[in-house]
């Protein structure tokens, strides 16, 4: 069912799209009649996802690439251009976590995380933004976190990378005023996806309380993105958590982070 009230059918590119919030965002946009460009490193899962989304009657193009590879953003952009696809909405959703004491976590994984969360996100934004400005229409949604708002012991690199996403997105949003292009940051809290299991934090207190379903996060994200909301914090608990950061002493925030992320 096509619910887009535009003369031109829009196209959205989503990274990290085969599970969790990324998958649910692809479903929401397909339901609304958007054509999709789906990016993931798992080609088999991309094929399965494409089959499941065909029922919505939209065009779906898949790209199997790993965003931890520095060459990937240019390759994605070149492939999209070669297919004569114009991306109206860019969703930089791909990401993962490496949690624990910084002195004992994997440097390799953390460097890959920085590549995905910061460098590839920035690179893709840099590549697709000029076309949006030229077209006088575009939306960019970058995935932050409730961890974007304060340092998080036991999640030092992850939270720092998400702080970059929030600040970067807010800054270029201001630069783009009047261009027809908007930038939003999605900042979910704990969400019931494969993310926590892969990071071995699914048994932490953080993922035992106030955990949201990815479908709900995606629905909120879509509605707020369409309304050009600057920062999208999903769920009442997460909004209260973020609003309390400014008035809570740092030593208490540090202890709270350690409590929530300690592995049982």
Image (cartoon, grey):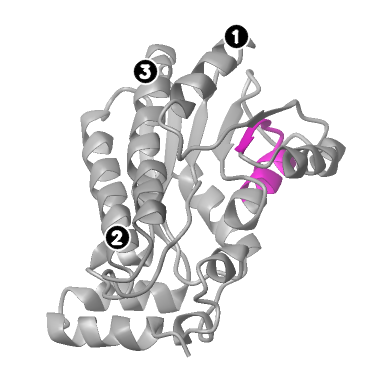
Decide: is 37 above or below 99: above
Residue located 31% across and 84% down the image: 258
The numbered mark, 1 or 2, whose residue comes first in the sequence reads 1
10 Å crowding of disc 1: few (<14), some (14-19), many (20+)? few
The numbered mark, 3 or 1, whose residue comes first in the sequence reads 1
Q: Quadrant of residue 261 in the image?
A: bottom left
Decide: is 199 above or below 43: below
Q: Would residue 167 be found to the left or right of residue 54 on screen? A: left
Residue to which mark 3 is pinned: 133
Alpha-carbon distance for marks 3 and 1? 20 Å
Residue 229 visible: no
10 Å crowding of disc 2: few (<14), some (14-19), many (20+)? many
Residue to which mark 1 is pinned: 82
The numbered mark, 3 or 2, whose residue comes first in the sequence reads 3
Residue 105 visible: yes
Decide: is 242 above or below 121: below
Alpha-carbon distance for marks 3 and 2? 32 Å
Q: Find out whether residue 136 is within the magenta segment.
A: no
- Which of the labelled discs sits on residue 157, or is there none? 2
Q: Which residues are magenta?
A: 25-40
């Amino acid at each position: 069912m096509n619910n887009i009230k535009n003369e031109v059918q829009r196209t959205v590119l989503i990274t990290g799209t085969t599970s969790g919030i990324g998958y649910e965002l692809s479903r929401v946009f397909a339901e609304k009649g958007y054509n999709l460009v789906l990016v993931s490193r798992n080609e088999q899962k991309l094929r399965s996802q494409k089959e499941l989304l065909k029922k919505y009657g939209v065009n779906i193009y898949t790209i199997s690439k790993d965003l931890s590879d520095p060459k990937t953003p240019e390759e994605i952009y070149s492939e999209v251009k070669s297919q004569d696809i114009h991306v109206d909405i860019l969703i930089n959703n791909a990401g993962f976590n490496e949690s624990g004491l910084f002195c004992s976590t994997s440097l390799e994984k953390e460097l890959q995380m920085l590549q995905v969360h910061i460098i590839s996100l920035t690179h893709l934004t840099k590549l697709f933004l000029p076309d949006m400005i030229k077209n006088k229409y575009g939306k960019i949604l970058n995935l932050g976190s409730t961890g974007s708002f304060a340092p998080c012991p036991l999640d030092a690199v992850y939270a720092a990378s998400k702080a970059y996403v929030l600040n970067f997105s807010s800054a270029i949003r201001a630069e783009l005023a009047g261009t027809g292009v908007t930038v939003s940051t999605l900042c979910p809290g704990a969400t019931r996806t494969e993310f926590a299991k892969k990071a071995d934090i699914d048994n932490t207190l953080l993922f035992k309380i106030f955990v949201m379903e990815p479908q709900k996060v995606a629905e909120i994200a879509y509605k707020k993105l369409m309304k050009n909301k600057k920062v999208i914090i999903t769920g009442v608990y997460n909004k209260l958590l973020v609003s309390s950061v400014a008035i809570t002493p740092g030593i208490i925030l540090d202890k709270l982070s350690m409590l929530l992320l300690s592995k049982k």
